[in-house]
Image (tube, helix red, strand yellow):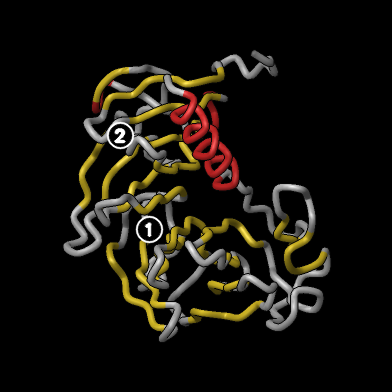
Amino acid sequence: MSVFSRIATASALLSASIALAGCNSGSGSVIQGAQSSTIAGSFQSGTADGPASTARFRNPANVAVDSANNVYVADYDNNLVRKIDSVGNVSTVFSNPNFVNPFGIAANSSGTVFVETDQNDTGTRNSTSGTVWRIDSRTQTGVVVARNLGRPRGIALLADGRLALSDVNRHTISLLNTTTGAVTLLAGRTDTPGFVNGTGAAAQFHRPYGVKQDNNGDLIVADANNNAIRRVTLAGVVTTIAGRRAGKYLRG
């Protein structure tokens, strides 16, 4: 692998680690940067927009960054999408009575944000009710792209406009056509956790959470319960980049 490719993969792995942000009600609601400096919020939870020092979140579960360095936040317990601009001002860009428990989030350069909610827009919440919304942060409007997808808590916007979905309950990686709402299985055996490299349904994951696309077009997946980082090509070929299932902490 070239030096450029290694750097690109390292960047994608960092993004995947961000996507593994836990959803734990009552935890400190602080969004932090790479050097552990506070961008906005405090350990006091709340629902306040405004300057970084006075803004408040309530269990921010995940973030996405656009090309203008705006940070979009899935504010889980507030049922909101928030935006932190490049100078630290916080605003609410989407709120809807049927928009509940946002987790997965991705953004493009034109202000469109895709968000996964654990509850669907009809009020159902179960292991299959995960729903993807398309939100226009400029007009603060949103529509459902597809509902009852499982629990795709990891989402990544691909260069061709599709979304990659990592489903923590079904143990799969899928592709969502954001125009038609059609979902295609890319890799993993549905409802069958495991740790197997392979192609398509021959491969296995165990609660894949974070997913990002690297500069080569491959997907980098944080395979949580396998304690591993996996690579998935858009042809569905799965390999393991690093980590091991035993859960030991090793450098190398």
Mark 1 surroundings: few (<14), some (14-19) or many (≥20) residues within 10 A: many
Q: Secondary structure at mark 2?
A: loop
Indicate whether 54 appears above or below 112.
below
- As drawn, the label of residue 229 is none
Q: Quadrant of residue 70?
A: bottom right
Q: Quadrant of the C terminus?
A: top right
Most extreme residue toward the front, as rendered?
Answer: 3
Q: Quadrant of residue 73?
A: bottom right
Indicate whether 153 appears above or below 107.
above
| Position of residue 131 measured from the top left corner of the image (x, y, whole percent) | 37, 61
Q: Residue at x 48, y 55 (%)?
A: 104
Indicate whether 17 appears above or below 42.
above
Q: Is residue 172 left or right of residue 34?
A: left
Which three-letter amino acid code belongs to the residue tagged 1? Ser
Which three-letter amino acid code belongs to the residue tagged 2? Thr
In the depicted view, which residue is nearer to us: 153 or 90? 90
Q: CA distance from mark 1 to mark 2?
A: 16 Å
| Position of residue 65 measured from the top left corner of the image (x, y, whole percent) | 53, 60
Q: Residue at x 41, y 51 (%)?
A: 155
| Position of residue 218 measured from the top left corner of the image (x, y, whole percent) | 34, 35
Q: Residue at x 30, y 31 (%)?
A: 233
Q: Secondary structure at mark 1?
A: loop
| Position of residue 194 measured from the top left corner of the image (x, y, whole percent) | 42, 22
- Residue 124: in sight, yes or no? no
In the depicted view, which residue is nearer to us: 6 or 78? 6
- As drawn, the label of residue 129 is 1
Residue behind mark 2: 190
Q: Residue at x 49, y 41 (%)?
A: 209
Q: Quadrant of the N terminus?
A: top left
- Residue 8: in sight, yes or no? yes
Q: Specify which label sits upstream in the sequence, 1 or 2.
A: 1
